[in-house]
C-alpha cells in the first residue's frame, strides 16, 4: 500500500528524535516517543497508517508492515536526506507543508500577538511581530536568529537531492 504524497505520516523509533524534529520543522506529521517498544511502534504505524523510521535492522527485517524506512546514517542531516529521497522517489516532488510543533507534532497557527505576551520572554515580545502557536500543546514559536541556520540546512539538503 503506497501512501499518497500529502499523506506521508511517520513514526520514528527512539533512536531518531532529532530526525523527527527536523521532519516536523518541514511540516511532516511525525510521531516520536523517547521510549517505545517495537510491537507498540508497529501497532501505531499500522493503526494510523504511518511509515516507520528506524535504525533497527532487526525491526526493518520483521516485515510486520511494508511501510518501513531503514535509516543508515548516524548524522541527522543525512538521515533527513534519506527520508526526503524516499518521498521524492515515490512522489516525484516534495510537497511544501506548513511547519508542525517540534515538541508535540501538533499543527501550528498564526497567533494573536497579545496571546503570546505571557508565553514568550519580554524582549521577544517587543522585537517580534509574528508568532505561531501549537493547537495541541499551546507552545509559542517565533522566527528567531536560528531560523537562518535552519533554512540553510534544509535548502542545502534539498539542493543535494536535486529539488
Image (cartoon, rainbow, N blue to C red):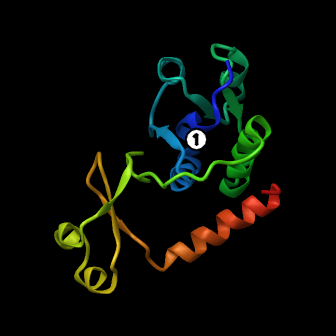
Residue at image coords 47%, 39%: 32
Residue 119 picture quarter: bottom left
**Number of marks present in the image shown:** 1
Q: Which residue is mark 1?
A: 15
* Relative side of 159 to 69, left or right: right
The location of residue 141, given as percent across then percent down, is: 36, 65
Q: Is residue 68 above or below residue 126?
A: above
The location of residue 62, given as percent across then percent down, is: 68, 15
* Relative side of 44 to 57, left or right: left
Image quadrant where one finds the N terminus: top right
Q: Is residue 74 visible?
A: no
Residue at image coords 60%, 30%: 52
The location of residue 126, given as percent across then percent down, is: 26, 86
Does dot 1 land on a helix, a strand or a loop?
helix
Residue at image coords 32%, 86%: 127
Residue at image coords 51%, 75%: 146
Amino acid at each position: 500500500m503506497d501512501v499518497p504524497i500529502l499523506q506521508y505520516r511517520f513514526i520514528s523509533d527512539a533512536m531518531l528524535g532529532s530526525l523527527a524534529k527536523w521532519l516536523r520543522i518541514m511540516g511532516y506529521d511525525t510521531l516520536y516517543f523517547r521510549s517505545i517498544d517495537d510491537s507498540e511502534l508497529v501497532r501505531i504505524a499500522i493503526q494510523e497508517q504511518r511509515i516507520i523510521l528506524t535504525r533497527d535492522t532487526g525491526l526493518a527485517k520483521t516485515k510486520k508492515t511494508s511501510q518501513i524506512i531503514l535509516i543508515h546514517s548516524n548524522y541527522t542531516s543525512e538521515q533527513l536526506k534519506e527520508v526526503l529521497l524516499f518521498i521524492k522517489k515515490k512522489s516525484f516532488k516534495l510537497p511544501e507543508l506548513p511547519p508542525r510543533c517540534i515538541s508535540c507534532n501538533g499543527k501550528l497557527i498564526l497567533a494573536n500577538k497579545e496571546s503570546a505576551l505571557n508565553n514568550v520572554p519580554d524582549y521577544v515580545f517587543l522585537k517580534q511581530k509574528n508568532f505561531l502557536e501549537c493547537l495541541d500543546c499551546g507552545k509559542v514559536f517565533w522566527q528567531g536568529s536560528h531560523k537562518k541556520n535552519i533554512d540553510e540546512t534544509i535548502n542545502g539538503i534539498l539542493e543535494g537531492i536535486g529539488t
